[in-house]
Image: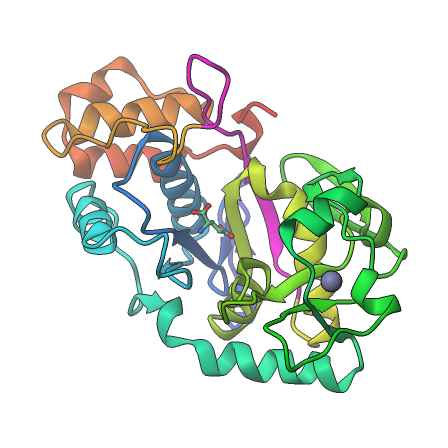
Amino acid sequence: MVVICVKPLYIGLVNFLVESTQLIDLNYRGRFALSPTGPLHFGSLVAAVGSYLDAKYHHGKWLVRIEDVDSQREVPGAASGILYMLERLGMEWDEEVVYQSQRSEAYFEALNILCKQGLIYPCTCSRKEISDSSIMGLNGRIYPGTCLKNPASVKKIHALRIQTNNDLIQFKDILNGTFSQRLKTDVGDFVLRRADGIYAYQLAVVVDDAAQHITHVVRGADLLESTPRQIFLQRLLDYPIPQYLHLPVVMDAKGEKLSKQTNAMPVNSLDTLTQLVDALHFLGQKPPVEILEGDVVSFWQWAQQNWRVNLIAH
Ligand code: GLU
Ligand code: ZN
């Protein structure tokens, strides 16, 4: 192990090596962005643990955001239940929790900036019209651009879409390597505000990651294919582009992503340590068996010091 001596000259720098494997990055700001559609389950626990450990390993900050833009999908009490569970699990967030339901003004402003760039257009197509006239893309149907070719009346209830292009959008995921997409052909023009006035996840997440100065996004790999859309928006809005680390997704016995929709078992508040250890194993980490003899505090001590991204399966 090479120990690099930190000379006073370097103390003002934010990044410095304490040992060969650990990079301290005091600027690191990570987050766990949860949808309050039900209780915390093992899949979301893995995302919480992964984002928390990566932030704490770097001596950075870990923030929590409640992604409750879509009030129809929200389950009353789910947000506070998840926050309570995170506390029980010994995961402390560093700044006040941000609720997307209170951030509409910020989303409106961002939409306005994109509008001034001439990239937003109204769309009055129904789901049926789109499914009859489009092909499947990487992430749902590729909107065929009907309302771009024949502008829709804004007097009718309409969604707002952004015009995409075929530039190659490429980024290097910390775990999965280079990932690229051409939005127009792979995804199509996507919705930023739905016809019911609800802002789309793709816009809200980008605005909030920028507002919270997030430098590292650690989340499930089901969102890998959303990342080029987010980078596209970040570039247009002149936001910094965070680093991305997409964790493997937890599947159930049927091979489906564990989610509240598939009735995944909630994390049990009576046996937090075992579930934390299970999450750590899922993330490829190799805690000693004695970790189960300790408590949540000793768990986090070991996990933070020994976090190794290169052990995660990908
Ligand atoms: N709220 C999203 C979810 O629960 C996560 C979004 C993100 O991490 O960017 O799937
Ligand atoms: Zn349309």
**Where residue 24 sits in the image (x, y, percent)?**
49, 54
Which residue is found at the position 26% from the left and 14% from the top? 289
Q: Tell me the magenta residue range.
A: 241-257
**Where residue 163 sits in the image (x, y, percent)?**
80, 66
Q: Quadrant of residue 108?
A: bottom right
Residue nearest the observer in this picture, 258 or 200 = 200
**Where residue 284 sits in the image (x, y, percent)?**
47, 22
Q: Image quadrant for the C terminus? A: top right
Q: Left or right: 297 with respect to 242?
A: left
Q: Is residue 17 visible?
A: no
**Where residue 147 sits in the image (x, y, percent)?**
79, 66
Q: Left or right: 298 with respect to 259?
A: left
Q: Is 294 situated above or below 120?
A: above
Q: Is 119 situated above or below 189?
A: below
Give the prevailing secondary structure in the magenta stretch: loop
Which residue is found at the position 46% from the left and 22% from the top? 251
Q: Is 110 situated above or below 223?
A: below
